[in-house]
């Protein structure tokens, strides 16, 4: 960042100023104590709360509509979020003067970005796309051929970008260009690592995407609410407005919400059934034992105070408690990391696309941590590790082409015929 010209020393050329909106810049830290930044001491807190609440209502409404539309629309939403995150992060270290001397350098960043997108989504969605076009022989053969060479295509696209980068190197610009090259790859790791887990969660069942994402939103809103009205004790210097009251209140709210929401979401097959293709039709499946209610008889003293003698609980609610615990205690550290990152670059927000919230990246800091945990937890503690007929069939449908499935069917038929002959 350019230093203030207070010593009479001429300022740096304006061309070297990072191309970032001034509204995002942060006033240098002064000697004020951390407590002076708390929301309870903010004179404009009600105005900022109204702006934040208005934006939140629109975001939640749009989010609910996309969830209703299904897996493909949710995946499209993730892609759009990725593009906005990439734009905000690319602009973070951008310098207008240097960029003007390297025509097409911004385009090179996006070349790497969309190459990474093709690689990640090709790996995740390839077999689902094949399963979608099995009825059309021409499309099936075309898609199968493309995915057969998918890795080679992505590799040569990356090599093309690498050669493009080398050919655009300019004298006296090496440090800036290599810095941008490294920063671009860092962005790809941050954006696409979490998004790959997010999309995998979506197709395992919207439940495993929706519940973790909702818990992060609830935790964020509850922390803001409790900090707004009761916050007195600063939590961490990286986020001056975060308080212990907000952190504890949000943690309790999130864990309770996880248990309750899992019971509600777990009763809709649209949310619990996995999607094995890329169609948009309604889903019907056996929800499995995790989503089948079990009756628990309450102790006698409970029925004296409340009208219930027994309650219906889904086994998945116990898993939801683990997700709620992580969302309330560990995931906020993603936000603390982002706060420290922004302080390092002396900016308030990554962008200004969401009034009252900042940029898209500001909303995704905790979501990135949560998405990875949700996938790992699902694969480690929820998906059955022992073999079953349903699990083997899922693996066959997801990993074998139509021709391989047919060959397997014929081979199994021969084996069964031989077994029947032996028994007779």
Image (cartoon, grey):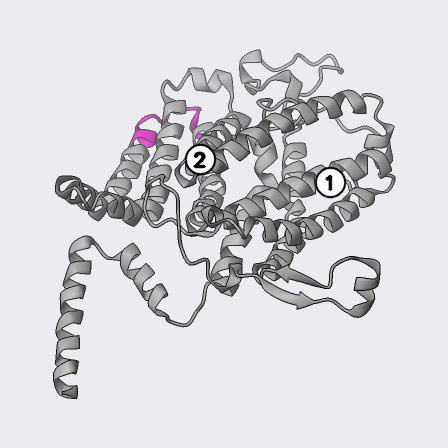
Nearer the observer, 102 or 9:
102
Q: Is 308 placed left or right of 60 in the picture?
A: right
Residue 404 found in image quarter: bottom left
Expressed as whole percent of the image width and height from the top left, the position of residue 83 reads 45, 30
Query: Mark 2 = which residue?
Result: 69
Above-or-below relation of 407 to 158: below
Where the N terminus falls, by quadrant?
top right
Chain part drawn in magenta = 164-174
Disc 2 is placed on an element classified as: helix
At numbered mark 1, what does the secondary structure look like: helix, strand or loop?
helix
Within 10 angstroms of label 1, few (less than 14), some, or many (20 or more) residues? many
Q: Nearer the viewer, residue 226 or 36?
A: 226
The residue under label 1 is 222
Residue 124 image offset from top left, x and y in percent: 35, 47
State whether residue 238 appears in this view: no
- The picture places residue 285, in percent across and down from the top left corner, at 40, 55
């Amino acid at each position: 960042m350019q230093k203030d010209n207070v010593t009479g020393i001429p300022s740096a050329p304006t061309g070297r100023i990072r191309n970032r909106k001034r509204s995002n810049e942060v006033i240098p830290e002064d000697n004020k104590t951390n407590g002076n930044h708390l929301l309870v001491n903010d004179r404009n807190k009600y105005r900022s709360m109204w702006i934040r609440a208005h934006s939140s209502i629109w975001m939640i409404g749009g989010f609910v509509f996309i969830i209703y539309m299904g897996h493909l629309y949710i995946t499209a939403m993730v892609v759009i979020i990725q593009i906005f995150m990439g734009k905000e992060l690319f602009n973070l270290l951008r310098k207008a003067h240097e960029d003007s001397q390297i025509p097409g350098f911004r385009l090179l960043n996006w070349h790497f970005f969309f190459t990474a997108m093709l690689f990640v989504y090709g790996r995740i969605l390839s077999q689902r796309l094949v399963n979608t076009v099995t009825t059309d022989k021409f499309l099936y053969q075309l898609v199968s051929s493309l995915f057969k060479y998918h890795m080679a295509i992505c590799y040569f696209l990356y090599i093309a970008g690498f050669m493009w980068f080398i050919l655009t190197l300019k004298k006296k610009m090496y440090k800036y260009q290599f810095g941008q090259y490294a920063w671009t790859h860092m962005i790809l790791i941050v954006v696409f690592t979490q998004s790959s887990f997010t999309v995998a969660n979506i197709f395992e069942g919207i439940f495993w995407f929706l519940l973790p994402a909702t818990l992060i939103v609830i935790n964020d809103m509850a922390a803001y609410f409790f900090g707004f009205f009761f916050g007195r004790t600063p939590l961490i210097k990286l986020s001056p407005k975060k308080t212990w009251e907000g952190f504890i209140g949000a943690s309790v709210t999130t864990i309770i919400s996880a248990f309750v929401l899992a019971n509600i979401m777990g009763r809709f097959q649209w949310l619990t059934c996995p999607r094995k293709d890329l169609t948009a039709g309604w889903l019907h499946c056996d929800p499995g034992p995790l989503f089948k209610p079990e009756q628990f008889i309450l102790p006698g003293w409970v029925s004296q105070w409340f009208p219930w003698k027994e309650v219906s609980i889904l086994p998945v609610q116990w898993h939801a408690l683990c997700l709620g615990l992580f969302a309330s205690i560990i995931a906020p550290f993603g936000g603390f990391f982002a706060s420290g990152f922004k302080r390092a670059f002396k900016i308030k927000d990554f962008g200004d696309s969401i009034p009252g919230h900042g940029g898209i990246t500001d909303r995704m800091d905790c979501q990135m941590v949560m998405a990875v945990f949700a996938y790992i937890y699902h694969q480690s503690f929820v998906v059955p590790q022992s073999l079953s007929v349903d699990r083997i069939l899922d693996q066959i449908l997801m990993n074998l082409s139509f021709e391989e499935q047919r060959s397997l069917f014929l081979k199994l038929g021969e084996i069964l015929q031989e077994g029947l002959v032996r028994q007779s």
